[in-house]
Each structure stands twice: as C-alpha cells, then as structure tokens.
Image (tube, grey):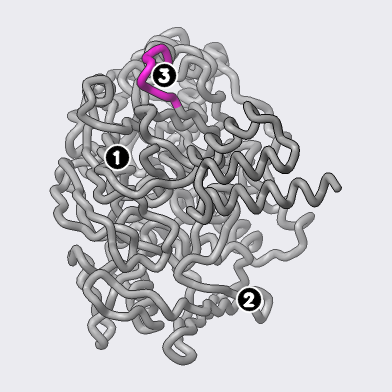
Amino acid sequence: MRDMKTEFIRGQSEKLANGGINRRQFITSMLAAGVVLPTAMTMAGDVLAATPNKGGLLRHATGYGGTTDSIDPSTSNNGMTQAVIYTRGNHLTEVGQDGKLRPELAESYEPSDGAKTWAFNLRKDVTFHNGKTMTADDVIATFNIHRGKDTKSAAKALVSAVENIEKDGDNRVIFKLKEGNADFPYIVSAYHFMIMSSDGSGNVDVNALDNSTGGYLTTSFEAGVRGEFKRNPNYWKADHAHFDAVNILSVVDPTARQSALLNGDVDVADSIDPKTVALLGRVPTVDILETNGTQHYTFPMRLDVEPFGNLDLRMALKLAINRQELVDKILLGHGLAGNDVPVNASMPFHNDQIPQREFNPDKAAEHYKKSGHSGPIKLSVADAAFAGAVDAGQLIAASAKQAGIEIELVREPNDGYWSNVWNKKGWCACYWGGRPTQDWMYSAAYTKDNNWNDTAWRDTPAADRFNEVIVQARAETNETERQKQYFEAQQLLHDDGGAIVAMWANYILAHTKKVTHGPDVAANWQNDGNKMSERWWFA
C-alpha cells in the first residue's frame, strides 16, 4: 500500500511539474491520498520551485578572461571562454550534474578491439545555428582541427593516439586509436572538442559565431569583455536552456565581481574570494554555492628556464612552502593542502601512500645549498591566476625566507596573464579545473607531447618513465595493474616534476536568490560544469 501511495504522489508531482494539473488540483489529490494540508501545500511549493521557468536575462560575472581570448574552442585557456563554449555548443559526450558520463551529441558509443576502436552513433535531430544538419563529416572535420601537424590546439595531446577517424554512414563515427583507451569517451567531452559545422570539404571556420549546436545563439563576442547569447528556439534538448538570453561578463577583479552582484548588476558571480564568503552569506538576497571538485592551484616551475632545471632547487622550493598556511589564509579552510600531484582522493587510483609534503625549512635549506644557486628567484603572480594569488605569493616568499631562499615577487597585469606569463615565464601562479580521469589530466598538462605542459617536464629520466607508464595505464584493462601504474606515475611526478600543487580549492560562487537550479550541481568544472546557462533558471 505504501508503495502505491508513493507512486501516486510521484505521478501527481510530475503532472504538476509538467502543467498537467494546477496547484489546487495537486493539493486536493494529496488530501485524498491521506496527506495533511500543511504538508500538501509544502509539497506543492517544492515541486513548483524545482520546475524550470522559461525567460529572463542571466548575467554572469566570471573571474576569467583576457583581451587575447578567441571564440575558437581549440585555443580556449580559461574559465570565461570555456563557459562560452558550453553555452553555445555541444560535445559527443558530457559529464552530467550527477558526475557521471553520458552521451550528448552521440546517442550511444561502444568499444571494440580492446578499446582501440570506439564507435559513436550520432543523433539525427541536431541542427547547427547556421541551419546545417549535423553529420559524421562535421564530427570528423572538428576533430581533425586538433590533429594536424601544425595545429595550435591545446587539445592536440588528447587526440595524439587517434590514428584514423572514419564514418560509417552519415550518423556513425569510428575512432581508431594506436592503443586501447578505456577513458576515451571522457576525452571527447573536453570543452575544446565542441562540434562545429564543416563546409563539405573538411574545412571548419573556427571563428564563426554560428557554427555550433548549443542552447544559445551567439549574438556577439568581445575578447576579455563579454559574450552575449539568445536562446536557440530549435535546441534539440527541449528541457534545457531556460533563459531568454545570457550575458557572460569578464570581471577579473574579485572586489568588482562582488560589488556587481550586490549592486544588482549581475545575477551570478563565480570564483568568490574565500575572504568574502562569510560576509556575502549574510546578505539576505544572496545564496552561496560551494562544491568540492578537482580544482587545484599550482605554481609550475619550467624546467627549460633556469634555475628550475635543477632537481635540488625544485625540491627546495617544494619544501619551502607552507601549504597548510596557504589553505588557512588564502582559502580560509575552503579546500585542502596539495601534494604536488594533480590527483586527489575524489579521483580513481589516487595514491594515498605518498606522504603529505610538509613545510620543512631545514630540508629546504639543505637542497638549496646542494643546488648551488644564489640570488633571488622570480615568482610571477596575478589574481587572474586565482583569487588570492598575489597574497599566496607573499606567503610563499615569507616561508621560503626561513630556509634562506630569497623569492622576488613579480606582480603581473591581470590582462594578458594567460598569454604572456603562464606557460612562458619560469615560475608563476596557475589554476587547473582538473579532469575526471588521471589520463585526461596528464594528457592535458604533463605528458611530453602537449602544448600545455606548463612545467616543460619532458627530458628527465623520471619524465621518460612517466610517459611510458601513462601509455601502459591507458590501455590496461586490469584494474589492479592499472592502479600500480598510476601509483608509480604519481610518485614520479611528486619526486621529480616541476609542478608545485599547493592547494585543492573548492568552487565557490554567489548568486541572487532569484536564480535556482536542480538538486545536483556538477563539480567537474566550476559553475555546474560551466553549463549553468543551459541547466539553471529563474525561480
């Protein structure tokens, strides 16, 4: 009897949510089912509150963006352009709000030949914003952008194992890999791989505003300033993209972002400085949303820039940083200390046998003496890297001083930081949104064959072994063996790599109470997997 009542309530709730019955009818049906009036009224309110409304302009202030940004997905390198991609486009697969991988532009996918071959069956009802129907040719042309010898794509390494892409009819694409990769369906969800329309000859205009399939049409894009979008009336996801329009605004300064939210100039502000969370939480019109994910703050040392090619010097700096102090004073407890590997306990095959690296000025001084270095070491910082990066640099300089290491803090301009400083200067502040699998994270930032290896860790014996192990683990189907391989990879990075992974930072955003969302919020990226535009709505 209890099960029948539960099913009845669920059915009536769905009817209310879908407009099949009104609030009064729902409450009457609940009373007939034996639910008391106050409870029935609360239930009706909860159902209606969780039902997406259509309409309104969403104004999203993001802490990222620069004047060198591009609408080209292959060169996207920060949170603003990533949000633009997910607002205007789709991918073969996506990570859902529950954190699980699911098909998107592909209806299904299946492996063969030991995961060396992957077939993706495409949806047949998808139209690009320019009116063209999506086919296998568009998918192939999109991926070939990232595979070319002279490509500038930041995702080149992610598809370096792809030997061939072919179609089997208009709606089936087959990827053939050099070796098996059980994680390949995750790879194709990467934001760089937004599917774009081709011209029939295999060419794609990566700078076109209308070559995508997403929930919103791009009306304008100004690098480092804003992107403006309006709802796609023909979106193939009928139950998504609820706003009439979306504006994504680059507001790099944390104080300016917060002020814009409090003044009513925007509806959502991301990358909230932990120092202001408690204050914002007391504002009656604002809600704070905090999620634990794979975001981490790093200080990469480039091995191809002196003096960071010296292992003893790298070890000295790793030991000269008080990570817990950074978590306490920069994140104010909204995160965890890092351990110089881009993997934490939330990810598969995390090596919890590696002891946490602690602040040890005596050992740091020993390694520094062995390095033979003298004089100041430059550390480039800007709050464009992450909220509080300048303050973090000051704390690092202070703790290193206790080991006899002089750090010269170079305050870089926020604008142009990602194009002029990161991945160029010897030592700088950086953030990574993280990736759902180890192979993806390593392929994005640590393997020798990619453009975003921001430590240039490629030529040491440990780096050579690391690259061998990653290839082995990628194709390994035995989970016990795969764990051993990933454990070794993490140890190699920890002991020899150029990345100081200092902190794991929670995603923190603030929004007005009129903005709402479902019960689950994805943590693979900030802002609900950066799909806020198509997943959220106004209450």
The span from disc 1 to disc 3 (Cα, nearest Å) is 23 Å
Is 334 on the left or on the right of 274, as rendered?
Answer: right
Q: Is residue 287 magenta?
A: yes
Q: Where is mark 1, residue-wise?
A: 422
What amino acid is at disc 3?
Pro
Residue 111 is labelled as 2
Q: Residues within 10 Å of mark 3 (few under 14, many from 20)?
A: many
Q: Quadrant of the C terminus?
A: top left
- The stretch of residues the image draws in magenta is 281-288
**Residue 360 can be seen in this image:** yes
Question: CB of mark 1 within 8 Å of CB of mark 3?
Answer: no
Residue 195 screen position, x and y as percent: 36, 69
Q: Is residue 96 magenta?
A: no
Q: Nearer the viewer, residue 246 or 111?
A: 246
Question: In the image, what residue occupies the spot 35% across and 20% down?
Answer: 285
Q: Looking at this view, name the residue that lies furthest to the bottom.
A: 169
Total number of numbered labels? 3
Question: CB of mark 1 within 8 Å of CB of mark 2?
Answer: no
Question: In the image, what residue occupies the spot 24% across and 77% down?
Answer: 131
Identify the secondary structure beneath mark 3. Answer: helix
Q: Where is mark 3, residue-wise?
A: 274
Position of 132 relative to 7 (above/below): below
Q: Earlier in the sequence, mark 1 or mark 2?
A: 2
Q: Residues within 10 Å of mark 2 (few under 14, many from 20)?
A: some
